[in-house]
Amino acid sequence: MIKICFLLLFVSSISYPQQIKIEIKNLTTEIPTFSSLEGENVTSIDAVASIGRGIFIIDITSRNLRTGFYRLSFDKNRSVDFIYDGMDVSLTTEVNHILDSMMVISSESNRLYYSFVKLNKSYKAKSDLLQLILARYPKDDEFYDITKNRLSELQLEYLYFINEISQTEPESFIARYIKSGQLPVIDGSLPLEKQLEFLKENTLTNVNFNDSELIYSDLFTNKSIEYLTYYRNPQLPKELLEKEFQKAVDVIINKAKVNQLVYQHVVDYLIDGFKKFGFDLTLDYIIENYVVKDDLCLDEETENSIQNRVDQAQLLYVGAIIPNVVLPDSNGTNIDLSKIVTAKVVILFYASWCPHCKEMIPKLRKVYESQQGKEFEVVAISLDSERNEWLNFVEENCPEWLNVNAPDGWDSKVVLDFYIYATPTIFVVDKEKKIIGKPLKVEELIRMF
């Protein structure tokens, strides 16, 4: 009896190798990449060779993998995302229909994850359609009640999965992910015109911004973009659209502030997104109101891409003294900024090839020419590397100004001193060369005089 117990103890102490096994049917590429995910940041870990017919095994006994999302990437930007939480993973799918054909052989977390992804997709499509019917259909019609009842059933099924099926182990990574990632459920009797306001008020209600482990998923990035869509109005001009996005940004970031890691993660994502889509006003808004004020340490890639914006906001703020500028004009005579005695000086960084500069400069010239006396001087610093292009532009557009050239372009000392990251850039300074404004548009500059 003692021998049997000892044998059982010995057998139970054997640790079998843990592995991730993924089969991708009809795959032509044989060496996909295994990566970890953090929001939209993908960090390559290793290439994975096939053991035959699109079957890949990742031995994780020798790897120190944290709990979170991982990805197997292959041809044509396609990939399989999965959760690793210390348990074996076995998935099989077809290369051309990854989500629809996904089968989870082992891993309860991934079974719940893919059920949740499919359910969200189905629930949103069906509920949106049913809400639209309810908003347009006569309430005294029999079909209205049928539709309302079907919506109610759909919502109960959805919430049952969210609150019951997925929560058998409520502290697990996947349970917390689903709880935070759930879609808002809208009351079917709510008028269509009030539904948008409901979504703005409730989309982030269930998101646990204090759960820093969820950084290693797409949770916070997905919920941020979902929330931002409720402020997107294609009919608005870009400037007003950016104002709307700034409202959304305030809500998202202030909720994320409960946890420093999540806060930085969300800000990184928002900065990268607004930069990609050219929403400079919103990007600057985030930098000035959050990155600079709270001295955030952004991830290296994000920080490198916007470092000049951050430095300019931190060091050349309203009230700071600007670096002096001494550059030659078209005749070779040095223009010394410190010796200009007008009450105000407008310092403009531009380039003749910059379309926004070409739009702004004629407006600024009109303001300059309409002065009563000499209220301000303009020092126009060109980043043109071709001297003749600069001279021709000056002659046509702004010959009355103090025109100087930084011939090394973006590498010029004056550009580096002022942390210039885009053209046009304007600083307005007083007699003491203290910054009194950094207008983005001529209309803002006019209000300063």
Image (spheres, rainbow, N blue to C red):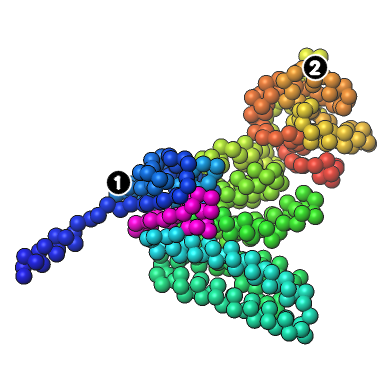
**In the rendered image, which residue does mark 1 sit on?**
62
Q: Could you say where residue 23 lies in the image, as x and y percent from the top left? A: 41, 51
Q: Which residues are magenta?
A: 80-102
Q: Earlier in the sequence, mark 2 or mark 1?
A: 1
**In the rendered image, which residue does mark 2 sit on?**
388
Which residue occupies 59% across, 63% down? 121
Which residue occupies 30% across, 46% down? 62
Q: CA distance from mark 2 to mark 1?
A: 63 Å
Residue 142 seen: yes
Corner quadrant of residue 51: top left
Which residue occupies 77% across, 28% down? 353
Q: Mark 1: few, some, or many residues within 10 Å (few <14, many ≥20)?
A: few
Type of the residue with mark 1: Ser
Q: Could you say where residue 408 lies in the image, as x and y percent from the top left? A: 67, 21
In this picture, residue 106 sits left or right of residue 151: left
Q: Could you say where residue 170 lies in the image, as x and y percent from the top left? A: 42, 70
